[in-house]
Image (cartoon, rainbow, N blue to C red):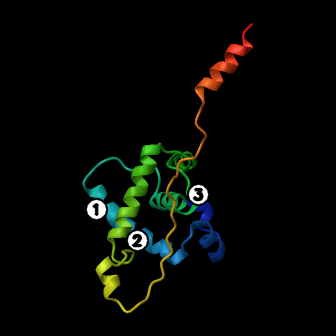
Amino acid sequence: MKYEVIKVLEEEKFRRLTGVKRSTFEKMIKILNEADKSKQGKGGRKPKRGLEERLLMALEYIREYRTYFHVSQSYGVSESTCYETIKWIENTLIKHPDFALPGRKAVLKSDREYELVLIDATETPIERPQKNKSRFTQEKRNDTP
């Protein structure tokens, strides 16, 4: 359903919505189609959604930082199915040489210079004043008649 609406969009709007160019999307579909054929050859139940819909589900999850619950509700599947689908798509594309990133050693050996930006997103506890139990109990005693 969603892919039928999206595929008629012009190139600029398609990229804005999905985060990838149409040619990259088609390349992803081709890779996933080959992997899906080998996966389906082993048997099992056919997925509810087509390959394009499942790829859109993964791209929506990655691009919009939505939870599995929200994405699954948008596509009418369970949360666990959504999780398994997205993980399968990510792992399949990462394994393919067209979408694989070079390893650490390859990056160190190359002549390119990389600029890194690190963001510290650790949680820190909030500093709160200590509760003074003796003060609290004195106020409570004074309030009672």
How far is the residue under mark 1 from the one under mark 3? 26 Å
- First along the sequence among labels 2 and 3: 3
Give the amino acid type for the residue marked by disc 3 in the picture. Answer: Lys
Return the residue nearer the eye: 92 or 144.
144
- First along the sequence among labels 1 and 2: 2
User: Relative to 2, does residue 139 appear above or below in the rendering?
Assistant: above
**What number is the disc on residue 38?**
1
- First along the sequence among labels 1 and 3: 3
How far is the residue under mark 2 from the one under mark 3? 19 Å
Q: Which residue is mark 3?
A: 2
141 with respect to 93 (left or right): right
**What number is the disc on residue 30?**
2
Quarter-wise, where is residue 21 in the image? bottom right
Label 1 with label 3: CB-CB less than 8 Å:
no
Looking at the rendering, in which quadrant would you find the C terminus?
A: top right
Image coords of residue 5 (percent x, y) = 62, 61
